Image: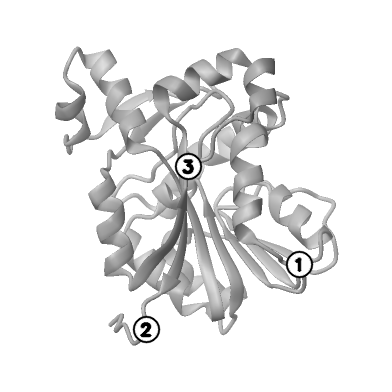
Amino acid sequence: MVGSDGSAEIVKSVGASRSDSAQPWTQLAPDYEKARNRDDSLDRLVEWPAQRECLGDITGRSVLDLGCGNGGKLAELVRGGAGASVGVDISGNFITTRPSGLELVQGDLSELDSIAALAGRRFDRIMFLQSFGYASDPVRTLRAARAMLADDGFILLTRTQPIRYALERAERNGTSLGGEYFSRGVYSYRSGWNDQITLTKRPYTMSDLLNVFSGAGLWIETVVEPQLSEDARNRYPHKQAWMDKYLGILIFKLRPLPDHKTE
């Protein structure tokens, strides 16, 4: 996920156990929610409004939020008219006040097939809001999500603009933007939400994302790159300066390819 200061996603290392992958996010979850609730949070100002618009009319629609954090966004959707919905997060650090029709489940989005609460369920909207970097096998996770889509359903998936990470690494390492953009080496850094916790990131390119979507049998209906409103730019010039440098996020609306085999 990306915090209000633009800090990067927590990514599970390949081969890590569920307990290993849960530990850093369990520690960081309260810090992330605190940052997200700030008045100048990019999530509040840019990301969530754009994500909400892409979801369209959710009245009576079932929603699955994979990597839902504390479940606050999904609760807002249910209160706004969404049907029976489920949120899954590895931390288990959920809100205590929940509207009727909202179920929050502790689970690993890399192992969707093993989450009992999802067995046999179908959803009109499936969301990966800055959570997809957790997946140890991205194609497998997207295929599992695709199998849970109802007729005419879609997946809403957001990821940080990959150039942002390449620029950060180039600045830190004194290297070139292109060299870092195509680098396959992982890197570690202190969390922007809690500088006592070190996170590890796997870099990715635009072609990586497109190939994952294709491999999972999905096509891109819409891509959005949300920006600050004029009012927000004037109120929070430091956030506009960050967006000018690091670009922000990509929002993908994904639908299943017809007759795509996912064996």
Q: Where does the image place residue 233, in percent across and percent down from the top left?
A: 62, 21
Find out whether the residues at labels 1 and 3 contact each other: C-beta distance under 8 Å. no
Instruction: Establish if 217 lies above or below 108.
Output: below
Q: Which mark is residue 108?
A: none
Three-letter amino acid code at disc 3?
Glu
Q: Earlier in the sequence, mark 1 or mark 2?
A: 1
Q: Position of residue 117 (x, y in %)?
A: 62, 74
Label 2 to label 3: alpha-carbon separation: 27 Å
Circle 3 is placed at which residue position? 225
Question: Distance from label 1 to label 3 (Cα)?
Answer: 25 Å
The residue labelled by disc 1 is: 82
Based on the displayed image, in which of its 4 quarters is residue 10 positioned?
top left
Q: Residue at x 66, y 44 (%)?
A: 49
Does residue 95 appear to the left or right of 120 in the view shown? right
The picture places residue 113, in percent across and down from the top left corner, at 46, 74
Position of 106 with respect to 200 (left or right) is right
Mark 2: give few (<14), some (14-19) or many (20+) Cα within 10 Å: few
The three-letter code of the residue at mark 1 reads Ala
At x 14%, y 28%, the residue is 179
- The kind of residue tagged 2 is Pro
Residue 258 — which label? Answer: 2
Q: Nearer the viewer, residue 72 or 17?
A: 72
